[in-house]
Amino acid sequence: MKRALLAFAFVALGASGAAAQGPDPFAQPQPEQQPPPPPPGQPVVVQQQPYQAPPPQQQPAARRGARQASLFIPITFFVTNADIFTGGAGIGARFGWEFQNFIPQLEAGVHVNGVEGTFGDVTLQNTWFGLGLRFQFLNASRFVPFIEGMVRFNLWSINVLGTEIDNELQFGVHGGGGVTIELTRFFSIDLQVNLHASFDNAGVFSSIPGSNETQLILEPRIGGTVYF
């Protein structure tokens, strides 16, 4: 009986030692299992990933040119002495150079107003040149509001039956604002209203009975601008 128990103990110890040794380090690696080939005559199905085109690259939006050339028609109404001077009209030109929101600019033009009771025989003409600065409120729409200020030099003259009888160079300023409607990146329509002050030095206006020396003139405008 003792011999049987001893034999059983030796067998158990040998089995546990073999389990503790783990896998045989000299054992050959097993080959990877490959999927079985398709039966003869059966087509081989190859799975392909659908082609995905790369996303299109967005081109930057074309920007209008920085230089601006405008033609406009001013309609002039005297705020002071409206009972003496009739409404008038003229033509003007403007050039500006855009630096983001700011546009330094210069302009020149001429407008003619009548004198009440003369039936067009007496006219008041202003030929002017100005230097100023415009500030525009840029946005994503076609409508670009702006405000501006300008120093102007006005050559006023009085004409009787087409003959000039007096003239004077005066200093003036104007301020105003409006909106630019961009039809394309090359062209826009401009709507604007200015208030112009012209300071007389006992000259042209002083020679007209009842008129003020300093005149305020309301000046709506409509014009067009080319960008290049």
Image (cartoon, grey):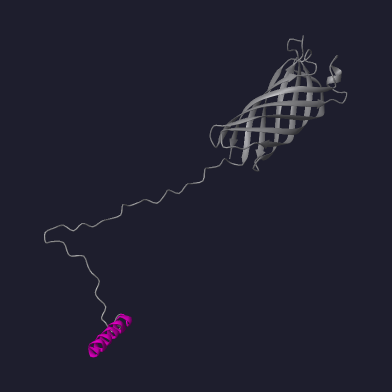
Which residue is painted at 79% across and 24% down in the image?
156
Extreme-bottom residue of the structure: 3
Whether 219 is among the magenta residues is no
Extreme-front residue of the structure: 1
Between residue 35 and residue 201, name the one nearer to us: 35
Snapshot quadrant of residue 87: top right
Q: Position of residue 129 (x, y in %)?
A: 74, 32
Residue 103's place in the image compared with 7, above or below, is: above
Q: How many marks?
A: 0
Snapshot quadrant of residue 37: bottom left
Snapshot quadrant of residue 28: bottom left
Q: Position of residue 71 (x, y in %)?
A: 63, 30
Whether residue 5 sits left or right of residue 161 in the image: it is left
Whether residue 127 sits left or right of residue 98 in the image: it is right
Q: Position of residue 143 (x, y in %)?
A: 59, 32
Between residue 177 and residue 113, name the one nearer to us: 177
Residue 32's place in the image compared with 108, above or below, is: below
Q: Position of residue 199 (x, y in %)?
A: 83, 26
Whether residue 6 sits left or right of residue 91 in the image: it is left
By secondary structure, the bulk of the magenta-drawn segment is best described as: helix
Between residue 100 and residue 17, name the one nearer to us: 17
- Where the N terminus falls, by quadrant? bottom left
Between residue 177 and residue 5, name the one nearer to us: 5
Which residue is painted at 82% across and 28% down in the image?
170
- Where the C terminus falls, by quadrant? top right
First to last magenta residue range: 1-22
Which residue is painted at 63% across and 35% down in the image?
69
Extreme-left residue of the structure: 41
